[in-house]
Structures are given as structure tokens and as C-alpha cells.
Amino acid sequence: MAEKTVSKYLLNLEKNFASDNPVLQKAAKVFHELDQIEYDLGLLGNDETTACKDSWWPIVSLIGGNSTAKSGFINSYLGSEYMLAGLQPSSHKFTVLLHSSQSTPTILPGTALDVDHRYPFYQISRKIEQQQAGEGDRINSYLELKTINSDRLKGKLFIDAPNINAVSSNSVASLLMRHTIECSDLVLIFTDAFDSAAPLVDELVETIVRHQDTNKFVYIINEPAAALNRALNNEIISSWQRKLSGLGLNTGQFIVLSTVENTINPQNQAGFAAIDQRMVNVSYDRSYRVLHSLEKSIREIDNVVIPEVTKGIAIWKDRVHFSTLLILGFIITFALFAEIQMGILDLLIDPIIGPVVLIVLLAIIVPLHILISKLQGKLIIKQLTARQKELHLMENLAKLFEKNLTFSRMLMPITEPAGWNKKTKARLYQLTDKTKELVQLLNDNFGTYNDRSLVNYSDPLNLAN
């Protein structure tokens, strides 16, 4: 098997994480091992990598109901650079905010996000096109990228979702809202969003319910009356907890900001401190998300990719066998008529002529069977290509299927895809084990299990304990 070249993306990831995140550095190596397996199967090209399925940036998204609460928070939290740049949040676009060392801010079109696998909206235009034909080409109407010089943006991305009230309810807006929440490590939801009567609110609640066990949601309550009154602050939080519980939202952190534009009062200082702490943890959340993406990619080969190709092979063989049997049926029918008219049975059982007839029959049937296999294979390739787009897979299902269009596999009753064997399965199991070890290694950053590293395992007394 040919050795796959390590993608430049993985090389850059290993270099970036070499000094501060050894877990993600090792994860990049495991991704390459997975790439090698998929390359051997024909699922990936030499310059492709499964690591680009999800962004490796820590991602924070912000969702609000009106322009006042969320825009005021962004202005206060990101600092004067954002306000002086005049980069007010867009009322109708999903805006990715990126740190830049340049003093001059930049606004880039949505295509900058759609074609760059480092960002969370990579190839989102394909999904948009499936949701609504013709809208995939209008990616700039839905997305934009803004770069500003703000220290709080260093090492992370912010996704500023358009205000719920300003977005018309359609399949594209719903798709982008779901995608934003799913790819984020932290979601700041301003509670005024739930006061809105916009149709998108119901879909927002449904999406949060599906993901609320991830502990990524923080609810920001903008309440000027709570300035210095701790008791009132607790009452406001309790009120919102009851309200959201009625919507099925039972988890999440609540933070009250009395006046988001004013960061001087103690209430906001405490709220901003809590938000800063969550921002620090975003890097850890990102690491777990990347490892989960790695494990998911490994599972998808066994649970999605191989079953889809195996199903295609089964349909292909059924069609080929049916077509071949039709031809054989025609030949047998012709032979019966010949027997009735001329009596050729004696010739068929002749020890000399009979084998010759059989050889001639095979010389006709085998090439026809091969030809039919190739023609039916082209139809299956089209189906698998469409299925790949429908499932949003980067793995080339058709390419793996094409590896089965060999002379021996056309004639033999082999249903498993080429290359899918015990050795390949064992390699995937090893990668799963490595991923679990990386999760344990990441867990060790926060503590060790009973401090077992101090135990002398050569001492039988310790073993008894």
C-alpha cells in the first residue's frame, strides 16, 4: 500500500500545538493514521484529511433577540477597538469575528469562510444548496468575516448570529442557526431572544434541547434593575430558570449583567469575571470536541461509509445477476425451440460437441456478464455520489466502490468492499483505543485517579490496597 503524504493542514496543526497542547498534537497524528486507512480504501485523496471536518479553533457563539443587549455586550466585552472600528453587529448575517494584529479592521465576504477548512462554516454552501436550490451561490448574503484587534479574541473565534427578530424564518436560517450551535464550544444566549415572537425561536429552543447536555450554554440576562441588589439578582435568575424550564431547557449557567454598556458597577464586574472564566475553559472544550470528532470519524467508517458502499455492491450484484439470468433464460428458450424444431439434444450430450457448445456458451456469457457489470456499476457510482452529498460526507464512496470493479469480484460472490478486512478493522480499533487514551490524557490535566502514580506496584502490600 502506498504511503499517504501528511497534509499541510495537519503539519501546521502539529506545529501550532507542539508547545502548549500536546494532546491535540498527538490527535493530529492519529488523524493522519485515520487518513492513511481511508486513503488505502480509496475514500480520500492524497492531499485530503479528515481533520478538516470540524474547526480546531475554540468557538464562541452569541445569540440574542434584539440589537441592544447583544451589541452592547459585544462592544463592552471586545473593547474600544470594536466600537471605534464601527463594526456594529450585522442584523441579518452570521458574522465570524477573528483577531487580527492589524490596527485597521477588515470585513471579508462569506466565501472566505466557505472555502477555508480552518473555519466553522467550511463548505456550508453545499448544505445551503440542498436546503434551498440556488441559495448556495448567495453565501455572501448569509455570512461574513470581520477581523479586529481585540485581545479577548486571541486564540478563539466568535460567531455573532443575527438577531432572532431580524431573521425571517426559512430553511437556510434554521440550518445556519443549528450549525452555529452544534459547532460551538460555548453559546452565549441573551434571554431577550425568548421574549421574541419570531418563528425561529421555537427552532432555537428545539436545537438547545437537543444539545443542552453538552453544558455549553450560558444565559445572559440583561436587567438594569439588578445593579447592586444580590437578592434581586437571585430572584431574577430563579424567574428565568422557571421560565426556561417550562420550555424544556433545564441546564445552563445564568449570568446577570445589569447594564452591559457599563462595566464599572460590581454586578457587571462579577458577570464579566464569570464569562472570562468560561472563555478560559473554551480551549479545553475545544480539545474534547476535536477528540469527539476524531472518534466520530472513526465510527463513521464502520457505521456509515462501509454500510453505504456494501449496500451499493449488493444492489449492483443483484442487478447484474438479474440481467445475466435474463440472457440465460433467452438462450435456454431458444434452445428449447431448437430442440422442438431440429432435435439438438443429441448434439448437446455428445462427448465432443457438448463441451464445445459449453465453451462457446461461456465465451458469450462471461464477456456479457462483465459488460453488464460495468454498465450497472456506472449507475451505482452515480447513486453513491448523490448519497455522499446527501449525507455530507467527505469520503469518496464511489471511489471505494470502483475498486470492486475487478474481473474476480465481478464473477465471485463477494459483497464486502475491497480492502475492508480484519486487518483494516483491527487498525480502526487501535485508533479508537488511542483516542480514548488521549481523552484520559486530557482528563489528567485536571487531576489524577487516587494519585496512583505514587503507588509502588512492586510492593504486594500496595496491590492489596
Image (tube, rainbow, N blue to C red):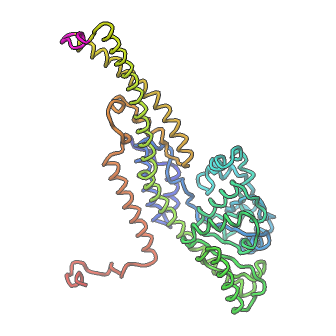
Q: How many marks?
A: 0
Q: Position of residue 91 (x, y in %)?
A: 78, 62
Q: Pick out the residue farthest to the left.
A: 351
Nearest the eye: 94 or 389: 389
Viewer-side residue, 226 vs 75: 226
User: Which residue, as the protein is rendered here, is positioned at the far top?
Assistant: 342
Q: Quadrant of residue 64?
A: bottom right
The N terminus - image quarter: top left
User: Based on the displayed image, in which of its 4 quarters is residue 169 positioned?
Assistant: bottom right
Against 284, is 16 above or below?
Answer: above
Direction from residue 209 to residue 144 in the image, left or right? right
**Res. 11 visible in picture:** no
Image position of 9 with respect to 323: above or below: below
The x and y percentages for residue 149 are: 71, 65
Q: Position of residue 260 (x, y in %)?
A: 76, 78
Q: Residue at the location (55% across, 60% down)? A: 56
Q: Quadrant of the C terminus?
A: bottom left
Residue in front for this viewpoint, 270 or 173: 173
Q: State left or right for residue 236 relative to residue 325.
A: right
**Viewer-nearest residue: 313 or 433:** 313
**Left or right of 441 on screen, residue 208:** right
Identify the residue at horizontal 42%, vertical 65% (top origin).
438
Visible in this render: residue 126? yes
Residue span colored magenta:
345-352
- Asked if residue 5 is among those painted magenta in the image, a careful observer would answer no
